[in-house]
Image: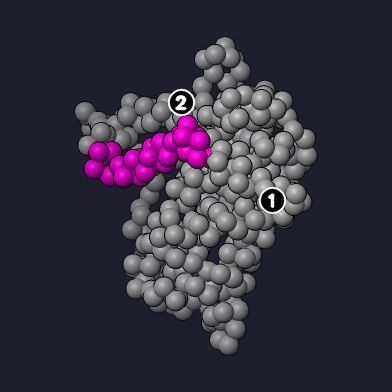
């Protein structure tokens, strides 16, 4: 049960651009290198990644069923378990204004992300001059500010605190994660400015005679196994600039490599070091490393296979990967990755 939860959490982080560290690193690389001119946005990423995530979770369930339940008949949930669930549900109580308001703001945030500047219709951000169009980060900051301003008890008693207050943010926010994300961006910038990404990219161009699908598989495997020994965000910050350099060197759409590598960085199932979900499960369940190796390897193989298949089935038509777009050609010819 514990391992299945951590694996599902890792697969789920690939579904949206904001749900996982590697996805945020991808957004940073696209913004820093290509200045948001790419075909990747919140909505079409969701359309591309959600089917693959569901299929991967289904295949992982089959793996768990084969490994752990093939010789056992699982009975229906007994009455004691049902009683525990019912008691926990009763403890939640009725919905209060505070909870309803937060749900509404969260749904609003997702909708603003989805329709900020989609590829298929005119987004709400286009009402602003191009120079001042808000990005995803601006939307988040605005919604957080609204949380501070809306009172949690609008009908009294007064004075009423906001939906969220700074002392709670200061105590509950995991500042180490913010520093980790910022440090990852610094590492990505350092690999670019120091020439490391260009050097490694040029080394990989020696294998550019292989078919593109083989290069995709190779890069996905490299990222998928590197992320077992370092955090997935760190792996993404190091590998994504390198594969972008390779794409520039051989003159193809960089998203052909960036998308599968980003998703492969989240498929961490074997060791606890790769993701916080793995580390939490490893600690709470008292697991041994060997407990995660066999199911982790099987899930690694199936998830990487789904990534490559999904890229060819949905990625090419959704993101237009079969052609090299103007924004990629402009970057190829710039000094940024020359």
Q: Residue at x 58, y 88 (%)?
A: 71
Disc nearest the viewer among 2 and 1: 1
Q: CA distance from mark 2 to mark 1?
A: 41 Å
Q: Residue at x 41, y 63 (%)?
A: 272
Residue in front for this viewpoint, 91 or 242:
242
Q: Is residue 159 left or right of residue 209?
A: left
Tell me the number on the disc at residue 56. none
The residue that disc 1 covers is 207
Element carrying mark 1:
helix
Q: Residue at x 66, y 35 (%)?
A: 248
Q: Is residue 176 left or right of residue 325?
A: left
The secondary structure that dominates the magenta segment is helix
Q: Residue at x 58, y 67 (%)?
A: 299
Residue 161 visible in image: yes
Residue 78: percent from left, percent from top: 46, 79
Image quadrant assignment for residue 36:
top right
Q: Looking at the image, is 20 positioned above or below residue 139?
A: below
Q: Looking at the image, is 125 positioned above or below residue 12?
A: above
| Residue range (magenta) | 168-197
Sooner in the amino-acid sequence: mark 2 or mark 1: 2
Image quadrant assignment for residue 267:
bottom right
Q: Looking at the image, is 164 positioned above or below residue 306?
A: above
Residue in front for this viewpoint, 92 or 274:
274
| Quarter of the figure with the C terminus | top right
- Residue 190: in magenta span: yes
Residue 7: percent from left, percent from top: 51, 63
- Residue 210: in magenta span: no
Colour setup of the view:
one colour
Q: Check disc 2: other Cα within 10 Å, few if <14, some if 14-19, many if 20+.
A: few
Tell me the number on the disc at residue 138. 2
Residue 180: percent from left, percent from top: 37, 43
């Amino acid at each position: 049960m514990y391992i299945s939860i951590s694996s599902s959490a890792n697969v789920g982080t690939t579904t949206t651009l904001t749900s996982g560290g590697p996805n945020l690193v991808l957004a940073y690389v696209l913004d820093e290198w290509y200045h948001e001119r790419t075909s990747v946005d919140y909505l079409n990423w969701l359309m591309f990644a959600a089917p693959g995530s569901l299929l991967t979770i289904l295949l992982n369930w089959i793996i768990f069923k084969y490994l752990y339940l093939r010789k056992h008949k699982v009975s229906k949930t007994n009455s004691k378990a049902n009683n525990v669930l019912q008691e926990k549900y009763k403890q939640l109580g009725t919905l209060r204004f505070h909870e309803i308001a937060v749900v509404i703001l969260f749904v609003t945030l997702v909708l603003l992300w989805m329709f900020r500047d989609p590829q298929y219709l005119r987004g709400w951000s286009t009402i602003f001059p191009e120079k001042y169009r808000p990005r995803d980060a601006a939307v988040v900051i605005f919604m957080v500010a609204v949380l501070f301003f809306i009172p949690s008890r609008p009908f009294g008693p007064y004075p009423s605190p906001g939906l969220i207050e700074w002392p709670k943010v200061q105590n509950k926010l995991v500042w180490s994660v913010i520093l980790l994300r910022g440090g990852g961006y610094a590492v990505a910038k350092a690999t670019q400015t120091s020439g490391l990404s260009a050097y490694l990219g040029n080394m990989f161009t020696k294998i550019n005679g292989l078919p593109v699908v083989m290069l995709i598989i190779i890069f996905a495997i490299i990222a998928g196994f590197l992320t077992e020994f370092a955090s997935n965000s760190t792996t993404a910050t190091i590998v994504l600039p390198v594969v972008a350099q390779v794409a520039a060197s051989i003159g193809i759409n960089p998203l052909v490599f960036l998308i599968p590598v980003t998703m492969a960085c989240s498929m961490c199932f074997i060791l606890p070091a790769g993701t916080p979900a793995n580390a939490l499960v490893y600690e709470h369940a008292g697991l041994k490393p060997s407990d995660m190796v066999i199911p982790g390897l099987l899930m690694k193989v199936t998830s990487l296979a789904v990534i490559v298949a999904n890229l060819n089935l949905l990625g090419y038509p959704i993101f237009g990967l079969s052609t090299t777009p103007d924004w990629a050609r402009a970057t190829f010819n710039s000094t940024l990755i020359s």
